[in-house]
Image: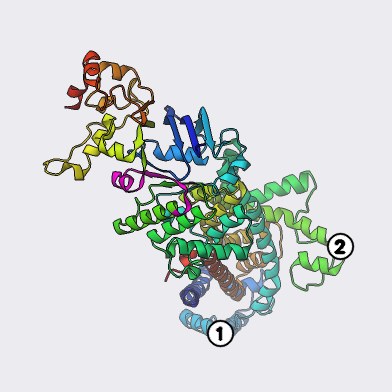
Amino acid sequence: MALLEIENLSVEFPTQGGVMRAVDGVSLTLDEGEVLGVVGESGSGKSVTMLAVMGLIPFPGRVKADKLTFNGRDLLTMSESERRKLTGKDVAMIFQEPTTSLNPSFTIGFQLAETLRLHEGMDRKAARRRAIELLEQVGIPSAESRLSAFPHQLSGGMNQRVMIAMAIACNPKLLIADEPTTALDVTIQAQILDLLMTLQKERNMALVMITHNMGVVAETARRVMVMYAGQIMEERSAADLFDSPQHPYTAALLAALPERSEGATRLATIPGVVPGLYDRPRGCLFSPRCAYATEHSRNVRPDLRPWAGGQIRCHYPLGDPNRNAEIQADHPVGAEAAS
Amino acid sequence: MLRFILTRVSLVIPTFLGITLLAFFLIRLVPGDPIETLAGERGIDPARHEQLRKEYGFDQPILVQYGIYLARVLQGDLGKSMITQEPVLSEFSELFPATIELAVCAILFALLIGLPAGMLAAIRRNSIFDHGVMGISLTGYSMPIFWWGLILILLFSVQFDLTPVSGRIDVLYYIEPITGFLLIDTLLSEEEGAFWSAVRHLILPTIVLGTVPLAVIARMTRSAMLEVLGEDYIRTAKAKGLSRFRIIALHALRNALIPVVTVIGLQVGVLFTGAILTETIFSWPGVGKWLIDAIFRRDYPVLQGGALLLGIVVMSVNLLVDLTYGLINPRIRHHR
C-alpha cells in the first residue's frame, strides 16, 4: 500500500477576477521511505499541492480530489480534529524562511516541546529531555542552552535545523520540505540537505523535496515530478528524467541549466511567461512556449497518462518514435512561436 | 535589563523639568490675580494686597519665583493650597485614589471589551461583526467626552433612572477611607448595599472615560491581529496540528499584543486628560475635578503640584509599559 495516494487533486481560490486554479488534476503516489523531488517555477503549484496534503490551504481556497489518502486513511472525509492529530505527527512540513517560520515570541524549547506534548502526551520534563535530544540530532551544538534561545538569536541555518527538529519530533512517516534551503547561504544549503538526507535514511521516512533548484533534486530525489501552471508535466525516476527528459518543458528546463550550456555563448532560455489567470490556453498549458506545439496541442489539452515508467502530460513525448510524423500531421506551429 | 531601566529613568529628568516649567509659566499667563480671586468680589485693601503678595513671594521677579519653586520641589515641598492651606501633596494623595479607581476601571473596561472585539473582528474579517465593531469604534473615538457623558446621563440616569447622576456613592453611606478605593473600602466596611452603590456610581463614568481607549484598543488589536495571522509562524503552528484556539489565543495574540501594549501606554496620558473632563461631568471627587477648580481659583501651588504629580504618574506608567513591552517582546529585551 502506498503511503500517500493523490488522484486528480485540484485547489482553487475564488478571486475577484474569477476562480484561480492553483493546482489542476495532480495525481501522485508516494511509497514509504521514498524521496520525491517536486520542481517547477514560482507559482507552478508545487507548494500549494503539498499544503493541500497538509490540510493547510487557507480560506477561501477549495480542495477537490477523487482520492486523497495517507497511510490508507481518507483525508477528504476526515474530521478537522482527526486531521490535526495527523498533521505535525505523521505528516510534517518545513518551510522556506526558517526565521519567520518560528514564532518570535517563544523560545526554541517551548516551540519544540509544544509539538511533543500535544502529539506524544509528554510531560514538561520528558518533552524537555526529548527536545535536547532532537536538537542534538539535527546538529545544534550545546543543545541544552539553546532551549531558552529565541529565534532571532539564532542564524537562519540554525533556525532551519530547529524547524527540522520540530518536524521530525514525532517520527513522521512523511516530511514535506518546501524549498528548505532557498533562503540560506550556499554553504549552509549543503549542510541542511545532508542533514535531511541523513535523517530520511535513518528513519526511512518519505521525503518530498519542493524546490526550483534542479541541482537540489539531482542530489536528493529518486523520483521527480515537474510541475507547470498547476499541472504535472512529467513525473519519472530522477536518473531517467535527467538522462532523457520526455516532456519538452523538462527538456527546456534542463537545457537552461548553466552546467549544460558549457561552450555556448548564451544561456538557453524558455521564451514567454507562465500563463496567468486570464490567459490560460485552451489546449496544453505549455503550448504557447513550446517549440513543438501544433494546432492540435493548442486546442486539445493533453491528459496526464502513464509513460516510460512514470507519467506525462504531452501529446508528443520526446521519446515517442512516431512523434515527428504526428507533429507533421497536426500542423506544427511551435517553431515560429518559439523563434 | 538594568541598563535599559536606567536609560529610561534618566529620560524622565528633562520631562520632569519641562513639566515644572510649563505648569509654572502657563498658569501665570492666564489673566487674573490669585490674591484678588482669593479675596472675592468684595475686593481687598491695597496695603493688605501688597502684604499678601509679599507673603506668597509674588513680588519677586518671575525667574526668581521659579528658582525658589524648583528648589522647594527638589526638597519634596510642593507648597500649600492657597485656598485650603492644606499641603498640595496630602490633598493630592487624598483625592488620587478616586481618580485611579476610575482610570483603572475605565482601562479594564476598554481592555475587556476592546481586545476580544478586535480579535474577533480580525478572525471574522469583512463580516458584519467586523464592520459593526469598526464602525462603532470609529464613532466612539470621534465622540467628544463631555457630550457623550451628558447623553449617557440623560438616557440612563434621567430617562430610565438606572444609574445615579453623579458622585462616588449614595449620601446614605459613610465609608471610612482605608485604601481610598471605594470598591475595596465598601467591601471592608461590611455596610450593606454600599458596594453596589459604589459600583452603580462607577458605571457611567467608566463607560465615558473608557470609550476612547476602547475604540483605540479594538482597532489596534484588529489590525495587529490581521497582520500576525498572515505570518509564516502561524502556518507553522497549523502545520504542527495545534488547535485553532491555541493558535489564536497563544501564538497569534502574544505577537499581536506587542503594538497593543504600546498603544495602551500612550492611552494612559489620554486617560488622565479624559479623567479631568469625566470627573467634572460626574462630580467625581478626584484630582481632575480638583485641578479644574484650582484653575478657576488661580490656586498656583495646587496647579503646579498637581500637574507635576500627574506627570510623574503618567511617566511611571509609561515606564512600566515599556518594561512590560520588553517582557512580551523578546526581541526588545535582548537588544542592546
On whether residue A213 falls in the magenta region, the answer is yes
Provide the residue designation for mark 2.
B172
Apparent side of residue A52 relative to residue B250 in the rendered image (left or right) = left
Disc 1 with disc 2 on a shared chain: yes
Provide the residue designation for mark 1.
B72
Contact, CB < 8 Å: mark 1 with mark 2? no
> Which quadrant would residue A29 be assigned to in this image?
top left
Q: Nearer the viewer, residue A299 or B205?
A: A299
Q: Give x and y (percent) for residue A17.
A: 42, 27
Q: Crowding near pointer 1: few (<14 within 10 Å), some, many (20+)? A: few
Identify the magenta region. Answer: A202-221
Q: Nearer the viewer, residue B9 or B294?
A: B9
| Residue type highlighted by circle 1 | Arg
> Which quadrant would residue A209 be assigned to in this image?
top left
**First along the sequence among labels 1 and 2:** 1
Q: Give x and y (percent) for residue A178.
A: 41, 46
- Callout 2: SS: loop
On the question of residue A56 being in view, the answer is no
Residue at 54% in and 52% down = B252
| Residue type highlighted by circle 2 | Leu
Q: Give x and y (percent) for residue A276.
A: 34, 30
Residue at 60% in and 76% down = B301
The chain that hosts pointer 2 is: B
The chain that hosts pointer 1 is: B
Q: CA distance from mark 1 to mark 2?
A: 42 Å
On whether residue A28 falls in the magenta region, the answer is no
